[in-house]
Amino acid sequence: MTRIPSSLLEALDRWQGGGYPPQPRFPWRPATWERRFTRADAPTLEGIDLAQAVGAVSEATQAAEDGRLDRIDRTIVTSLHAPEILMPGDGEHDARAVVTAFLAAMIWGYGTTGYGPYRTSRVLASDPDVVKHLIDVASRAQGSPNGGEDAFRHIAEHRGQADYLKYLGPAFGTKFLYFLTAASEVADMTPVMDAVVRRWFRSEADISLTTGSWDTESYQTYIGCLDEWREQMPTGRGGNRLERVDLELLIFASARGDDITWELPNESPTVDELLDLLQPDVDSLAEKSGSLEGPELLRRLSDWVAERAIAK
């Protein structure tokens, strides 16, 4: 049995204390994505206008509760992966809907990162059968309780073939698998496994995962740990057992320090409050590294803030 990392339990306490806040909506740049797919060198997929597909994602974000075109979140992207959207009526997959869903997952993953549209375009341009392969992945992921793991394994087995979903690594490929399984009533949700997860597992759980290639053993280890830990952890909202997606959220929040904001009051925190929240983590890193540089920099920053406040 793998020990539950203390940082995961601490993140859970903060999440519960904050009232189980959801992951916030992420910013993205619709115009940048649309421009990429209207260029002369944009990928050409038969019967699919990629700029219009990006426009469909824009429509979904604009139809959200706050109407912000330039904000995207898990709920919006999951809705675009719903089986009834991808496979309407006749049981056949709608190629445009599948490609739109894939674009939405990539947009969510890259956010405002400048190279996101280029890298996504490269995936679509480098595999001559990319639409067929994305449909196959979608079908497998949503087709059975273990569909996400089956789809991961299928991709891993076919990566030896020239051009098969070329340039789509597991860091972003598992984002597509996550949304496909999250939208399915049949499949168990399979989580994102990227460099953030890999670094957290190494530092907090002393477990090595491979995220540079489609390594099925790493993905099974990752999912196995999540399932093992959530069985041992306290219940979540409404007394229900935590889901894989909950632990994924806690891991990302812990790795990036987002969880400290869950303890803050609703009003904007003061600089002093933020510095106080940083202190324990900085001290912990200093202890692990044997360097006092971090605490000293934080102390000097605190002094500078205090001096500026007095000057006012």
Image (spheres, grey):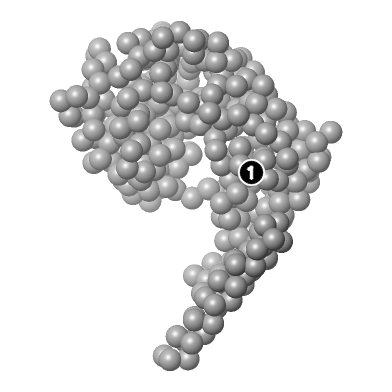
Residue 294 in the image: above or below residue 1: below
Q: Residue at x 55, y 10 (%)?
A: 157
230 sits left or right of 140 in the view: right
Comparing 256 with 47, the one in front is 256
Residue 23 in the image: above or below residue 55: below
Question: Is residue 16 in sight in this rendering?
Answer: no
Comparing 121 with 69, the one in front is 121
Q: Residue at x 35, y 36 (%)?
A: 116
Question: Considering the image in quadrants, where does the N terminus appear?
Answer: top right
- In the current view of this chain or complex, which residue is farthest to the left? 40
Total marks shown come to 1
Question: Considering the image in quadrants, where does the C terminus appear?
Answer: bottom left
Residue 87 in the image: above or below residue 195: above
What kind of residue is marked 1?
A: Trp
Q: Position of residue 213 (x, y in %)?
A: 54, 24
Q: Residue at x 67, y 34 (%)?
A: 208
- In the current view of this chain or complex, which residue is farthest to the front? 290
Question: Is residue 110 in sight in this rendering?
Answer: yes
Comparing 221 with 78, the one in front is 221
Q: Position of residue 12 (x, y in %)?
A: 70, 51
Residue 217 in the image: above or below residue 277: above
Q: Which residue is mark 1?
A: 200
- Residue 73 placement: quadrant: top left
- In the current view of this chain or complex, which residue is farthest to the bottom? 311
Q: Give the class, few, some or many, for how many residues have Cα within 10 Å of label 1's Cα (few <14, many ≥20).
A: many
Q: Residue at x 48, y 39 (%)?
A: 74
- Residue 261 placement: quadrant: bottom right
The secondary element bearing badge 1 is classed as: helix
Q: Position of residue 205 (x, y in %)?
A: 73, 41
